[in-house]
Image: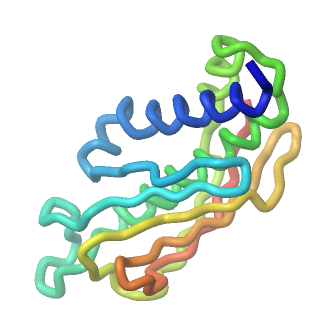
Amino acid sequence: MAASEKRQQMLAKMAEVFSNSVPFHNVIGLKFDHLTTEGCQISFDNKPELIGNFVQNILHGGVTATALDVVGGAMAAVAMMQKYPDADELELAQKLARIGTIDLRVDYVRPGRGESFYAKARLLRSGSKVSVVRMELHDNKDTLIALGTGTYMMG
């Protein structure tokens, strides 16, 4: 199997784990649209359980922060995978399990109104101990809702 094919399989498996193995992600309804070495995008539909301000029908800030953290953490995981291209699946899974959020800054730019939302991320820097990721959350009309910067411990 070619290295690029193996990487694509590992990325697909990682997206599946992020989507299906964390119960809170299932409550929100997070779905991975794409996960590549260049970027990551997730999406979710608005629903009553995700509303924080029921008078104005605005997405809960914690849901916004969670979506940004998930997409940022996924990009940090991609950076980890790139550092160890020859690692087998078990070794890589052990390394990925040690990734953790050190700091998450969220700038709430506009109220979260919309039928659906998507979050995207790109890697700013990846070192031996820390990765820094920039994230954005948009509504279904492509309106910017929030910006995030995440710093992730690289196991």
Q: Residue at x 34, y 44 (%)?
A: 25
**Image location of residue 83, percent across then percent down:** 84, 34
Q: Residue at x 69, y 21 (%)?
A: 92
Compared with 37, 58 (above or below) is below
For the N terminus, the quadrant is top right
Compared with 133, 137 (above or below) is below
Q: Nearer the viewer, residue 36 or 25?
A: 36
Q: Nearer the viewer, residue 121 or 140?
A: 140
Q: Residue at x 44, y 76 (%)?
A: 138
Query: How does the figure colour the protein chain or chains?
Result: rainbow
In the picture provided, is 1 more to the left or to the right than 28? right
As drawn, the residue found furthest toward the front would be 1
**Image location of residue 149, percent across then percent down:** 65, 65
In the picture provided, is 55 more to the left or to the right than 62? left
**Image location of residue 106, percent across then percent down:** 54, 70
Compared with 25, 108 (above or below) is below
Q: Residue at x 64, y 28 (%)?
A: 96
Say which quarter of the image contains residue 116: bottom left
In the picture provided, is 65 more to the left or to the right than 20? right
**Image location of residue 155, percent across then percent down:** 73, 30
Numbered label tally:
0
As drawn, the residue found furthest toward the right would be 128
